[in-house]
Amino acid sequence: MEGLETAVTAATSAEAEGGVGPEAGFLGGHETVETLLGAVRRLKTSGMFYTIFTQPAVRRRLEHFARRLGDAAADGSRALETLAGRFDTVLVDRLTGRLERFKDAAWCLEREVLANIDRVAELMTPRQPPPTPEALQIYQNLNTALNSLERLEVRGRDSAGVSLLFNLTGDGYAAFGRALARDGLEDAFRQRQSGETLRHGGISVRRTKEAAAVSLVYKVAAEIGSLGDNIRCLREAIRDDAMLHRLVAVPGIRATISAHTRWASVGAITEANCHPVDNGIVGRPAGAEAIIHACLNGDIDNYRQLRRDYETRCGAIPADITSDTKIIPLQVAYYLEQGLGVEEAFRRAVNDFEGSHAIALHTDLAPGCLFLAQRGSGQAIFVGLGEDVYLSTSELYGLVEVTDRYLKLDGERICQGPGGPVQGQTFVLDGRRGGGLAGIHAMAYDGTPLDLDEAQVKQTTITSRDVDRQGFAHYFLKEINEAPLSVARTLHNRWKLCPGASDCCQVVLDDRTFPPAVSRALADARLRRVFFVGQGTAGVAARACAEMLRYYLNDPAVTVGAMKASELSGFHLGAAGENDSMADALVVAISQSGTTTDTNRAVDMARAQGALTVAIVNRRDSDLTFKTDAVVYTSSGRDIEMSVASTKAFYAQIVAGALLSLHLASVRGRRDAVFVTREIRELLALPEKMRAILAMDRDIARSARRLAPAKAYWAVVGSGSNKASADEIRIKLSELCYKTISSDYVEDKKHIDLSSEPLILVCTAGTRGAVVSDIIKDTAIFAAHKATPVVICDEDEHRFAPYAADVFRVPTVSEHLAPIVNTLAGHLWGYHAALAINDGSRLLHRFREELQALIDDFGSRGLDVYEIVLEKSFREKVAAFYREFRSRCRQAGETTALAHAADLGLLLKYLSGRLPMGDFEV
């Protein structure tokens, strides 16, 4: 603790906060910041966490440190932003890296230490006595698993489950039994053990002469819901579970935890199918011979055959379980019955499964161990190596709260075993041996041992700060709101004041971002073609970048174009074997992840035919960065896309393209210092203009709620640079709203499908005056054909008002930067449109849930379907919904799909026992 205080004092002193020079003094210097970060991270270890949890004075001291670090980080950011344009690029890079590490330390202390103290306390009951160190470690690990699960929900949130598996001595189990008897919980404990299907609150027990094992499971299945709902339900269930708190209080208790969230691909979204699933079958609940719980990502392609084989030889699987995951613990149990050890039974079982999969399993037969298996390319398993704990996750961002060190199972690797080539790897993590390599036993699917050493341990630079939802309801909204910061980070340290001139700016790109070979090719007039390429949103950004370079360069000797990377590789390269067909070309490849197959293939092929190549990419050290001659990174490299891919990255890609293009024009001698200075200043003004658009959120939301559900057919239109705006808005609208949407030039739209009376988003902001006048006329035509135009235009443009259902006036920018402001408004409108459509669906969802509950209630009383239909309360429920449903159909602005639901209306009339035509009137 003293070391932490010393580091905090050194990093937050007046001299450290005061500025960025000299370099050694900024935030106390490099060594101070690294010492600070290491000291803060050690607070998360179980021993230090226990001290903070049980000693309020220590916590108050840390809260004071957190405030000091937060203030110092803000001061350092302002100082660096103010002076970055005057300092050397290399120096600013070093100071920026130091500032990011300092912010990591501040975040870690505030959110990963102090905030988790509160979260752990909330898992306990208010009247619970102070926990022992062993008990607190269980609660801390459980909280860590829930935090990780919440971050992973972005990959699927229709169900979530947590399994806690406790191993007790005989004396410990006896003490647990006495606690239950003392508090009158014995009957409840027995009731929760009943049932062949592992459900929410389910308990399994297996006793031997010397020991006992107890598992507790918490599950939630919700086809429709919001991020965080499921984890909130799990936390509440854990907090309210008296059994858990009695069990954790047993002296010397230890537990392993397995948790899962999933967008189910096989089986209905039900509690029975929610992972984890166990090895219980009809007539034999889990615990008779072993307790085995398993989770799965991917698919067991031969599940049906394996299920038939298992039921033939062993017994029936409960009918309400339709998930392919169920066969995993059953297959392991089958091999255990043949006399194999747990590890070998697990290995044999995973070899039986066809298809790409990632599996996690724990069992009371191997206390403290977690079994992992992965084969194929569709899934991943990362094993976080904490100081005293392992944390395995399906995505890297699931483990970064605990550690930055990890191993990754390589399910694609084919190794040569005794029986020939084999694919797939298994890891067994022994939590009793800490979080290091010594506690991991790795082997291939055929049992060939795999040696692990420190050289295979990887380290990530991202932290939970980079992937936190920051209080936003959805990741997509978070990423829209982070777009201005992403643009600012892309501009950071890429421009400088001209030497000796405070009113002159220049783009500064070093050899790593602008290869000398390009400069020589420009000087020698050997560069005659420039291609911007990408796929999806990156392909749209390529179009916007090409428009900018064409404007900046203004050189008829250089042809500038944009196309999909797959088009370049498929149709625009020379024949195979030609080595110089692209010798006069520069290919600028754009990608968020750097792993897009089509883009990377196009770069490989273009380079093979002599092209110079530059990548615009977000992810550092990704595949694409090793294929090109230079790389222009977007943002800080830690902008992790957690939602619909390439949202904030789209804006950063355009700005990176602008910097590259402006530098190309300068090197070519096509633009002077006055022009470059003006352009840099306009780029620097973009973040504030983007924030002004985000401030229009309420008006945009009101428009989307009113208009989106009312039209079945949508289109987005734009001309010139704004065709890129239309294309990108179309992509996000389609993904968010599950609609097929057209993207057209404004002038073409009146010739295409106006007969469908569509909703049309018209992108005109930044368009030159003469063209805007024509677009106003086209918009009038749209309105005359009963289309619903929504217009995005410059802030001083008022001529669209008579023809548009809504007009959004955004800050004025130059035409070549117009895709940024138009697309941002369109992204925001699309987000709220998706929410409006979702709200419209809740009527049907709510009725289905209520009706199912009513049917289940009647069924539990022995009524069959014919008797249920004749029940008065059932008919009243249907009739009440029918009236509301018909009313919604008649309301203007409701989802148009409801108006065509004749079959559903007739079915409801039949079910309510009322079929006369007069009853169709509300």
Image (cartoon, rainbow, N blue to C red):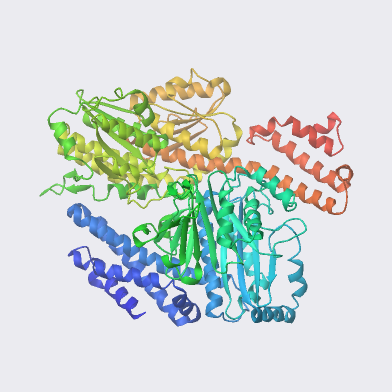
Judge left or right: residue 838 versus residue 586: right
Q: Position of residue 464 (x, y in %)?
A: 43, 59
Give the residue displayed 16% in from the left and 46% down from the top. Answer: 503
Q: Between 673 and 183, which is closer to the camera in this rendering?
A: 183
Q: Residue furthest top?
A: 751
Q: Between 580 and 500, which is closer to the camera in this rendering?
A: 580
How many badges with numbers are in the image? 0
Judge left or right: residue 670 versus residue 732: left
- Dividing the picture into quadrants, the one containing residue 286 is bottom right
Q: Residue furthest left?
A: 500
Q: Is residue 117 above or below residue 496?
A: below
Q: Is residue 359 above or below residue 508?
A: below
Give the residue displayed 59% in from the left and 30% down from the top. Answer: 712
Q: Between 691 and 615, which is closer to the camera in this rendering?
A: 615
Q: Position of residue 609 (x, y in %)?
A: 25, 29
Q: Position of residue 426 (x, y in %)?
A: 50, 55
Quadrant where the image shows the N terminus: bottom left
Give the residue displayed 80% in from the left and 42% down from the top. Answer: 878
Give the residue displayed 49% in from the left and 44% down from the top. Answer: 378
Q: Between 819 and 366, which is closer to the camera in this rendering?
A: 366
Judge left or right: residue 341 versus residue 14: right
Q: Position of residue 732 (x, y in %)?
A: 48, 38
Q: Residue 17, can we see it? A: no
- Dividing the picture into quadrants, the one containing residue 875 is top right
Q: Residue 545, can we see it? A: yes
Quadrant where the image shows the C terminus: top right
